[in-house]
C-alpha cells in the first residue's frame, strides 16, 4: 500500500509556483486567514517531540466602540502511543504523557482554549464490539485521570480545556457515554456535553458501548467566549449545529475520530459550512494514524474480517463565519494548530449577511412539529389528471 500523503497543502506547495499558490490559497481558504508567528520555543518543542506546530490568525474589521476580542484556539491531534495489546493503564499513561508534551507548546503559544480529539486518551476501539478491555478506559467526568490531567493544564497555562473522554456515569448505573468535559482556566470543571448522535455506519459500532447523549446543546460561558462541543458524528446533522448557535455559541468544537475511506471528502466542508450557516467559529479536530486490534472484526457490510479501522487522517482546522478557514494540520503526524480569532467577527458577519434575522424559525418549528407526529403527510403537490 502506498504511503499516506502528508497533506493537500503540502502537495500544492510542492507543485505550484509561489504566485499561483497565493491565488489558490485565497480561493480555497479565504482572504481572512493569515499565518500567525509563534514563539520560537513552540517550534523547538515540536521538533524535539516530533509533532507539527502551525499558527494562523483570522482577523475581523476594526470597530469604533468595541475593542478586538482576540482568542487563541488550540487544537491537538495525536496518534496512540503504545500497541492496543498493552495494558490499559500503560496505554492511557503514554497518551497522557504525549498530550502533556504538546500542551506545553500550546501554553508557550498563549492558547486560551485547548481541545483534544474525541476520546483522546484511548484507541478508538468501538469498531471491535468487544467490551473488554475497552470499557475500562471509561472514567468519571468529574475527577477521572484524563480530567485531572486537563485540570493541571488549565491551571498551569491559564487556559480553558476541552477534555473529550469515554465517560462512566456512576450515579446512573455506571452507564457509559461519549462526552467532553469543559474545564475553566481556573481548573474548575464547568460541566460536560455528551454526544448527541451515535453512528451506525461501517466500522463505527459505537452503540454497542453507549447511546445518544442527554445533555442537549449546552453552551459554556468562559473568560474566552461562549463555547460548545458538537462531538464527531453530530457534524453530519445541520440542526445539531443550529441549536448550538441558537443557544449563543461563538466557537463550536468538533472533536472527532474519522477515517479516510469513509468521510474525507466531507471533512473540509461540514464544519466550515456550519461556521457560515450558523455564524460562529468552528474547530474540527480529527485523530491521526492507523490503529490495529488483536482480534479481527466485521461490521455487517460484507467486507472481510480485518484488524484495523482504517487511516485516521488528522487534517484539523478552524473555520470562521465569513467563510474563511485555516489550512489543516498533517494527515499523518501529531500536531498542534494555534489559531488567533477575533470574536467580533461573529456579530460583524451577522450584521452583513443577516442569516439569523432572515431565518424563519417559527415556520421551521411549526413544520417540524408536524413532521415528528405519527400522522404526518408530506406536502407534495402532484399533477392531477
Image: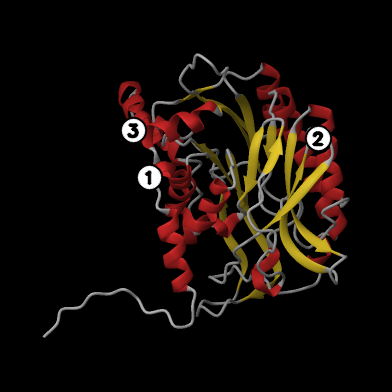
Which dot, 1 or 3, sits closer to the camera? Answer: 1
Circle 1 residue: 358
Residue that appears at 50% across and 14% down: 64
Q: Is residue 201 above or below residue 29?
A: below
Q: Residue furthest left?
A: 385
| Cβ atoms at labels 2 and 1 below 8 Å apart | no
Query: Which image quarter holds the C terminus?
Result: bottom left
Circle 2 residue: 153
Q: Is residue 144 left or right of residue 68?
A: right
Q: Is residue 314 left or right of residue 78?
A: left
The colour scheme used here is: secondary structure
- The residue carrying pointer 2 sits among few (fewer than 14), some (14 to 19) or many (20 or more) residues within 10 Å by Cα, namely many
Residues 94 and 280: in front is 280
Say which label, 1 or 3, has the lower sequence index: 3
Q: Residue furthest top?
A: 64
Query: Any mark on residue 27, and which?
Result: 3
Residue 358 image offset from top left, x and y in percent: 38, 45
Say which label, 2 or 1, has the lower sequence index: 2
- The residue carrying pointer 3 sits among few (fewer than 14), some (14 to 19) or many (20 or more) residues within 10 Å by Cα, namely few
Q: Secondary structure at mark 1?
A: helix
Amino acid at each position: 500500500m502506498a504511503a499516506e500523503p502528508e497533506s493537500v497543502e503540502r502537495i500544492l506547495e510542492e507543485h505550484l509556483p509561489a504566485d499561483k499558490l497565493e491565488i489558490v490559497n485565497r480561493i480555497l481558504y479565504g482572504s481572512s486567514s493569515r499565518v500567525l508567528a509563534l514563539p520560537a520555543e513552540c517550534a523547538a518543542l515540536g521538533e524535539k517531540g516530533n509533532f507539527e506546530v502551525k499558527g494562523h490568525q483570522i482577523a475581523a474589521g476594526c470597530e469604533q466602540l468595541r475593542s478586538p476580542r482576540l482568542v487563541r484556539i488550540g487544537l491537538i491531534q495525536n496518534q496512540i502511543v503504545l500497541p492496543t495489546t498493552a495494558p490499559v493503564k500503560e496505554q492511557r499513561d503514554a497518551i497522557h504523557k504525549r498530550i502533556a508534551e504538546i500542551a506545553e507548546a500550546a501554553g508557550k503559544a498563549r492558547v486560551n482554549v485547548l481541545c483534544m480529539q474525541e476520546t483522546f486518551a484511548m484507541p478508538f476501539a468501538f469498531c471491535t464490539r468487544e467490551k473488554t478491555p475497552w470499557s475500562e478506559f471509561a472514567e468519571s467526568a468529574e475527577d477521572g485521570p484524563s480530567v485531572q490531567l486537563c485540570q493541571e493544564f488549565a491551571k498551569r497555562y491559564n487556559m480553558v480545556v476541552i477534555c473529550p473522554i469515554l465517560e462512566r456515569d456512576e450515579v446512573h448505573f455506571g452507564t457509559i457515554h461519549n462526552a467532553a468535559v469543559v474545564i475553566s482556566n481556573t481548573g474548575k470543571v464547568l460541566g460536560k456535553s455528551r454526544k448527541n448522535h451515535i453512528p451506525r455506519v461501517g466500522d463505527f459500532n459505537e452503540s454497542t458501548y453507549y447511546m445518544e447523549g442527554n445533555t442537549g446543546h449546552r453552551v459554556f460561558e468562559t473568560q474566552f467566549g461562549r463555547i460548545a462541543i458538537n462531538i464527531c458524528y453530530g457534524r453530519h446533522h445541520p440542526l445539531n449545529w443550529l441549536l448550538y448557535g441558537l443557544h449563543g455559541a461563538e466557537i463550536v468544537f468538533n472533536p472527532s475520530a474519522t477515517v479516510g475511506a469513509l468521510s474525507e471528502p466531507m471533512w473540509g466542508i461540514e464544519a466550515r459550512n456550519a461556521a457560515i450557516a450558523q455564524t460562529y467559529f468552528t474547530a474540527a479536530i480529527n485523530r491521526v494514524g492507523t490503529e490495529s486490534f488483536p482480534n479481527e472484526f466485521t461490521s455487517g457490510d460484507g467486507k472481510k474480517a480485518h484488524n484495523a479501522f482504517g487511516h485516521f487522517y488528522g487534517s484539523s482546522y478552524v473555520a470562521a463565519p465569513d467563510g474563511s478557514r485555516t489550512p489543516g494540520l498533517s494527515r499523518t503526524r501529531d500536531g498542534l494548530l494555534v489559531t488567533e480569532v477575533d470574536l467580533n467577527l461573529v456579530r460583524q458577519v451577522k450584521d452583513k449577511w443577516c442569516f439569523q434575522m432572515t431565518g424563519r424559525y417559527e415556520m421551521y418549528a411549526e413544520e417540524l412539529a408536524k413532521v415528528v407526529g405519527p400522522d404526518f403527510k408530506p406536502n407534495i403537490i402532484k399533477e392531477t389528471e
